[in-house]
Image: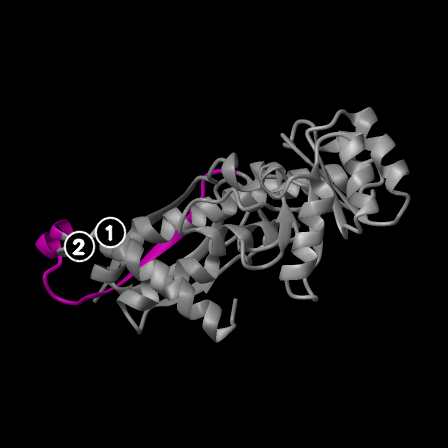
Amino acid sequence: MTDPMVQMQMDEHIRAALREDMPFGDVSTMSVMPEPRRGRVRLIAKADGVLAGLAVFSRVFELLDASARVDAAAADGERVASGQLLATVEGDVRALLEGERTALNYLQRMSGIATYTRRVANALAGSGTTLVCTRKTTPGMRLFEREAVRLGGGSMHRFGLSDGVLLKDNHIDAAGGVARAVAAARAAAPFVDKVEVECETLDMVREAVGAGADVIMLDNMTHEQMAEAVALVAGRAQTEASGNVDVSNAAAYADLGVDFVSCGALTHSAPILDLSLKHLEVLG
C-alpha cells in the first residue's frame, strides 16, 4: 500500500472518518489534556486471528500528529494470539486519544476480514482454484477491505464497475439474451477487457461459450450442475463458481476444477478481530 495514488485515496477516507468522529474536536480529550504531552499506548490482541491493516492504523495517528510513531511487534498477514502485544504507539497524548477508535475500527475490521479469508483460502488449498472477493463491500471501505482480503490469502476480482465486463441476469435481460449481451459488450468495451457472463443454467452456459465469453460464472448452481458445466466448457473459457459461498461450505468447491471461487462473505460476513489499545502512559 505504498503507491502514492492509493495512499492519497486512503488518506481521504481516513480524514473523513476522523471528521465523522470529532467534527468539532474531542471534548473529552480537550478536558483532560489541554496541552501537548508525549505519551505511549500498547496495542494488544484480545482474540486469535490474522493481523491486517497496521499501515492504516499507523496512518490515523500520523495524520493527527506527524511525530507519532508505531513500533510494530507483529506484521500484517501474521497469525496473532489473544494477549499478544502487537505494537506500541508513541505520540502526542491528544492524538493517541483522538485517534484510538478510528484506528481500531480500521484494524479490527481489516483483521477480521483477513482472518475469515484465511479460513476460506485454507479450505481451497491445493485445489488449484483461486479465491476472489466481490463488490459486496462496505461503502467507503472497499480499498481497505480488499487489502484485508489480500493479506488473508485471497485474490482480487474487478475493483468496480469501470474495471471489466460482467454481464449479470439483468444485463442479459436488458440486451435480450446471452448472445446479444456478449456481442454488445464486444462492440462497446475496450478490446483488453475480458467479458464474463453470469449463468444460472446449463443452457445459458452453452450459449455463453458459443458467444465467445472469456469467463463463465456458475451462479447458484448445485455441485452436480457446476461439475457438468465445467465439463461442458472444456477449457474454452475460464470458470467461476459463485453464490452463497462461505467458510462452512467452501471446501465443497475444491474438487470442481473451476478456476475461481468468488465469495462475498469475505467482506460482508466477517466478524471483527477483537483488539485493544491499553495502558496509556504520559511520558514526562
Which residue is painted at 83% across and 38% down in the image?
206
At label 2, counting other C-alpha atoms closer than 10 Å, the crowd grade (few under 14, some 14-19, many 20 or more) is few
Residue 10: image x %, image y %? 41, 63
Q: Which residue is mark 2?
A: 23
Indicate the position of residue 194 as horizontal and vertical percent values: 71, 57
Q: Nearer the viewer, residue 148 or 137?
A: 137
Residue 45 among those drawn in magenta: yes
In the rendered image, the quadrant that contains the C terminus is bottom left
Q: Is residue 113 visible?
A: yes
Residue sitting at x 50%, y 50%: 145
Numbered marks: total: 2
Answer few, some or many: residues within 10 Å of disc 1's Cα (few below 14, many 20 plus, some between 14 and 19). Answer: few
In this rendering, position of residue 48 left or right of residue 44? right
Give percent across and percent down for residue 229. Answer: 83, 34
Q: Nearer the viewer, residue 130 or 123?
A: 130
Residue occupying the point 89% across, 48% down: 235
| Secondary-structure class at tag 2 | loop
Kind of residue indicated by mark 1: Glu
Residue at screen point 11% across, 56% down? 30
In magenta, the rendered stretch is 27-47
| 63 over 154 or under it: above or below | below
Q: Which residue is mark 1?
A: 20
Q: CA distance from mark 1 to mark 2?
A: 6 Å
Image coordinates of residue 175 in percent, x first then y, are 62, 43
Residue 261 falls in which quadrant of the image? Answer: top right
Q: Quadrant of residue 33?
A: bottom left
